[in-house]
Image (tube, helix red, strand yellow):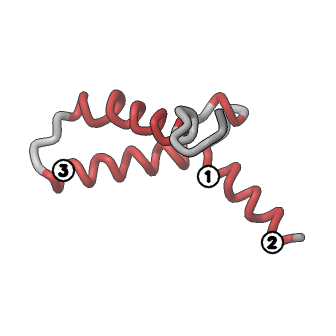
């Protein structure tokens, strides 16, 4: 099964949205859209810059991303 609409095509985004909702949106119960935007923005910064991810060797995603950028710049 390697065609459009395959169930694994969106797995990373689905997992991120699950984490976002369970760890931030549901517990916070935002009252206004402005509060929700600010809270979600802060969560995303933490998720990408500080939170350790086991699938990438317990490093934050932006550390891996910037290392890859530096490799391509040097080449």
Decide: few, some or many residues near mark 2? Use Cα within 10 Å; few <14, some 14-19, many ≥20.
few
In this rendering, the count of numbered labels is 3
Find numbered disc 3 in the image and state the secondary structure of the residue it sits on.
helix
The dot on residue 35 is: 3
| Residue depth check, mark 3 versus mark 2: number of the one nearer the observer | 2
Decide: few, some or many residues near mark 1? Use Cα within 10 Å; few <14, some 14-19, many ≥20.
some
Instruction: State the image coordinates of residue 46 (x, y, percent, origin top left).
Output: 46, 45
Q: Which of marks 3 and 2 is nearer the N terminus?
A: 3
- Separation (CA) of disc 3 from disc 1: 25 Å
User: In the visual, does 34 lie left or right of 14?
Assistant: left
The image shows residue 39, relative to residue 25, as above or below, that is: below
At x 40%, y 31%, the residue is 18
The dot on residue 73 is: 2
Decide: few, some or many residues near mark 3? Use Cα within 10 Å; few <14, some 14-19, many ≥20.
few
The image shows residue 74, relative to residue 33, as above or below, that is: below
- Separation (CA) of disc 1 from disc 2: 16 Å
User: In the visual, does 24 lie left or right of 65?
Assistant: left
At x 32%, y 47%, the residue is 40
Residue to which mark 1 is pinned: 62
- Separation (CA) of disc 3 from disc 2: 38 Å
Instruction: State the image coordinates of residue 49 (x, y, percent, origin top left).
Output: 55, 49
Find numbered disc 2 in the image and state the secondary structure of the residue it sits on.
helix
């Amino acid at each position: 099964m390697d065609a459009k609409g395959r169930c694994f095509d969106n797995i990373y985004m689905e997992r991120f949205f699950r984490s976002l909702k369970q760890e931030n949106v549901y517990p916070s119960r935002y009252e206004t859209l402005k509060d929700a935007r600010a809270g979600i923005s802060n969560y995303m910064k933490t998720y990408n810059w500080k939170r350790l991810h086991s699938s990438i060797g317990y490093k934050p995603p932006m550390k891996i991303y910037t290392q890859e950028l530096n490799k391509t710049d040097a080449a």
